[in-house]
Image (cartoon, coloured by chain):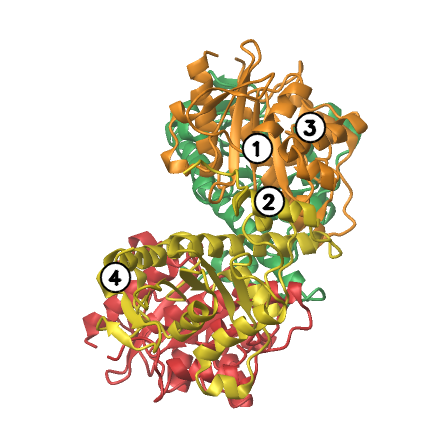
Chain colours: A orange, B green, C red, D yellow
Amino acid sequence: MTHEALKRAVWQANLDIVRAGLVELTWGNASGVDRAAGVMVIKPSGVPYDRLRPEAMVVLDLATGEPIEGDLRPSSDAPTHRVLYQQFDGIGGVVHTHSSHAVSWAQAERDLPCLGTTHADHFHGPIPVTRRLHPEEIREAYEHHTGTVIVERFRRDGLDPTHIPGVLVAGHGPFAWGPDPAAAVENAIVLESVARMALHTYLLNPSVRPIDGALLDKHFLRKHGPGAYYGQVS
Amino acid sequence: MTHEALKRAVWQANLDIVRAGLVELTWGNASGVDRAAGVMVIKPSGVPYDRLRPEAMVVLDLATGEPIEGDLRPSSDAPTHRVLYQQFDGIGGVVHTHSSHAVSWAQAERDLPCLGTTHADHFHGPIPVTRRLHPEEIREAYEHHTGTVIVERFRRDGLDPTHIPGVLVAGHGPFAWGPDPAAAVENAIVLESVARMALHTYLLNPSVRPIDGALLDKHFLRKHGPGAYYGQVS
Amino acid sequence: MTHEALKRAVWQANLDIVRAGLVELTWGNASGVDRAAGVMVIKPSGVPYDRLRPEAMVVLDLATGEPIEGDLRPSSDAPTHRVLYQQFDGIGGVVHTHSSHAVSWAQAERDLPCLGTTHADHFHGPIPVTRRLHPEEIREAYEHHTGTVIVERFRRDGLDPTHIPGVLVAGHGPFAWGPDPAAAVENAIVLESVARMALHTYLLNPSVRPIDGALLDKHFLRKHGPGAYYGQVS
Amino acid sequence: MTHEALKRAVWQANLDIVRAGLVELTWGNASGVDRAAGVMVIKPSGVPYDRLRPEAMVVLDLATGEPIEGDLRPSSDAPTHRVLYQQFDGIGGVVHTHSSHAVSWAQAERDLPCLGTTHADHFHGPIPVTRRLHPEEIREAYEHHTGTVIVERFRRDGLDPTHIPGVLVAGHGPFAWGPDPAAAVENAIVLESVARMALHTYLLNPSVRPIDGALLDKHFLRKHGPGAYYGQVS
């Protein structure tokens, strides 16, 4: 992907999370990375979505986090995105929203279990919630530490971020990612949708059990990996 | 219905489930059958709804499941639709969605009882949930077995699929059907709507009783069968 | 109101309940009455809303219920509307819907208490739920008896239908009314809205108390009756 | 802001609360104040939103509450707005709605705790609910007393209305405010959104704890006050 193509893909992802109903006001941001060029591209901070243009996307040095291009400040969540790109190999886009039901699970500090195939098609197991940040992590480099608690949770449980492409930050909300910005948007949509379904499922049956391992594997692997048979042959 | 008319009806049904708000991303598919010609027509797999055209619908041999016409792969759920057409006489269209509230009941693994006349107008009794599939049913011919557990539940309880035109597949979601693809769409809309109402009814009154048999019969039979008096004389 | 004006007002009311999101498929109907002329006007049965025209509205003799004008069958709920016009003086329009949250209360068979001023602005007390119909009331003249159980509940509790312009029919759904069809639509909108708010209020506080009598009177009477001061002087 | 600019800002705010989905029927009003000129501007009472024009906004004397300009009656809630302007220094716009989830908390008479950063970005702590009004406060100068119970609650707990820009009036609904009418609209949107998220959070985890003080401070202060770094440098 060329430099301009990445800016356009990130701009499109930022519009798409609004169109998908995941964003109120300016509560959301999408980014993309060009690992070969050592840069990430992200939405500027606090700009209304209807005034966003591809050329306003901010380009940052992936190694230092410093702006390389663009007159506007990057989204204040840029350091979180940067930690994810640095620590999670193989992800190419990140989306953060305050979508309503995913936030509710993050606020409830409950892992979102895999209760059905909608979930299993995109996430190969429960979507984890992080621990709360410590006061000192909040006071200094807060957005950076938001990334490190995400990584900590994945490392602790040996989770593969390409198989679990999202997380709930305690008391905050969801981050989702994928091989590129468009895939990150899709995973953010799925996360909100399964969060809503799971809430209602618990209200109907508080002792519901997650789906069986065989079904989880079947759905995730028919869309991902060497044996995939969903969609068209490309 | 001619061959081209069936493709158009199936295409229309696939658009209608999106317009009715039952589908996110590509989570849904509608099909139709021509029993005289021995074919079924279904949506291609993983194609965005806004790019669907009637001519892209895939025609399958009903007896073998093999594609007869069309360059695209059929929806991966085609084998489930095929089992339903083969085992349930008198149905002409099938719709599968991941509509949010119906999925929640399917994930909760609870039969959806008939709590009101909205339900009784279209379903002559509770909408059943299937058992979970066994691991071996998942690993081999999974989508085919999704159909067989549906049929198993109807056979076990002696349910008439023309009176109960829908089902909840455990840990997955709803299938609905009807005499033609448009009727299947209507039943899928009703299923989602009554699933939402029933969830809220339980929250208000956990010990709610289903409606009485006389009311169930009245509503179902005033719209279906020889004494129907709802709508216009055709 | 002239004859044609009434047909237009009823047609408009039928469109407005769809625009307000109270109706799915064809689950709703609105009517109006001209007491001087001894007629009521109602939507035809089972006609899609987007094909309705003012001239298609059906005119019935209020005394006999027989069609006077129009080629289409009246809504199957016409006998319910007729009982309400005959038994409740001072109402000029009736609306029936299957709006989701009002149906949930009707299915739960709970009176909808007055928990706030949104409710008190339009309904001067709880919105009652009827008893279930007996089997013999269902088998013969069902839609007529749906009206009589509504009237029975209002008579039993000495409720004034001009102060409580709506009801929940057990296991079925809401009816609302008002001085004219437009006012009936407004009351149907309010009923759905307060049903949703009251459900959520109970989830937050199962032991919530209704608002005090002084507040109930204040809100209802500032919009209705001789001392009204809400809106513009007409 | 000139006189005409204030009327236009208030008109815009009244349209924006409808566009944001916070208002049904005519249940909402927005106002603004010009403290130097000693006037407040508010929506007229009971006028449909689609017929509102900037010139129809009503101008009131802030000291007396009497109309200075405009042929229409002011919103019946004008005395509540006036008390807030008189008692809360530093607020320039007020919005009142009956938005569904905020009303549910007001009806449940529960303070809305700060469960996440969405809340903390705009409200520096729980959003308080007032006590019920006494009968004599309801019978005389009701709308004025609605303002005084709000102020009473803020004074009692030593709350700073510029840090907690909103309130829930028991059995009624939310008021929100801000430095100008547009900011008041934004806070009303946030209040509805966090009310919905908090309801769902409680359903998932009835014993959820509010976020930690360090996180509350971080989020509120990165958007407000001297160290703010959210958005663009203006």
Residue farthest to the top? Answer: A36
Residue kind at label 2, given as amino acid type: His
Query: Between residues C114 and A54, which one lies in front from this camera angle?
Result: A54
> Disc 1 marks which amino acid?
Asp
- On the image, the x and y values in percent for residue D230 come to 51, 39
Check contact, mark 1 vs mark 2: CB within 8 A: no
The answer as to whether the residues below labels 1 and 2 share one chain is no
Residues under labels 1 and 2: Cα distance? Answer: 12 Å
Label of residue A77 in the image = 1
Residue under mark 3: which chain is it in? A
Q: Residue at x 69, y 55 (%)?
A: D203
Identify the element where label 1 is drawn. loop
Circle 4 SS class: helix
Location of residue D219 in the rendering, given as x and y in whole percent from the top left corner? 59, 44
Q: Earlier in the sequence, mark 2 or mark 4?
A: 4
Could you give the CA–CA distance between mark 3 and mark 1, rounded to whole angstroms? 21 Å
> The numbered mark 4 sits on a residue in which chain?
D
Amino acid type at image mark 4 = Arg
From the image, state whether disc 4 or disc 1 is nearer to you: 1
Horizontal and vertical percent position of residue D6: 29, 58
Give the label on residue C94, or none. Answer: none
- Indicate the chain on which mark 2 is placed: D
Report which residue position mark 4 lands on. Answer: D51
> Looking at the image, do the residues carrying marks 3 and 1 touch, with CB atoms under 8 Å apart?
no
For mark 3, what is the residue? Answer: A164
Residue shown at the point (53%, 56%) measured from the top left? D191
Task: Tell me the residue that label 2 is attached to.
Answer: D219
Near-viewer residue (B12 or A203)? A203
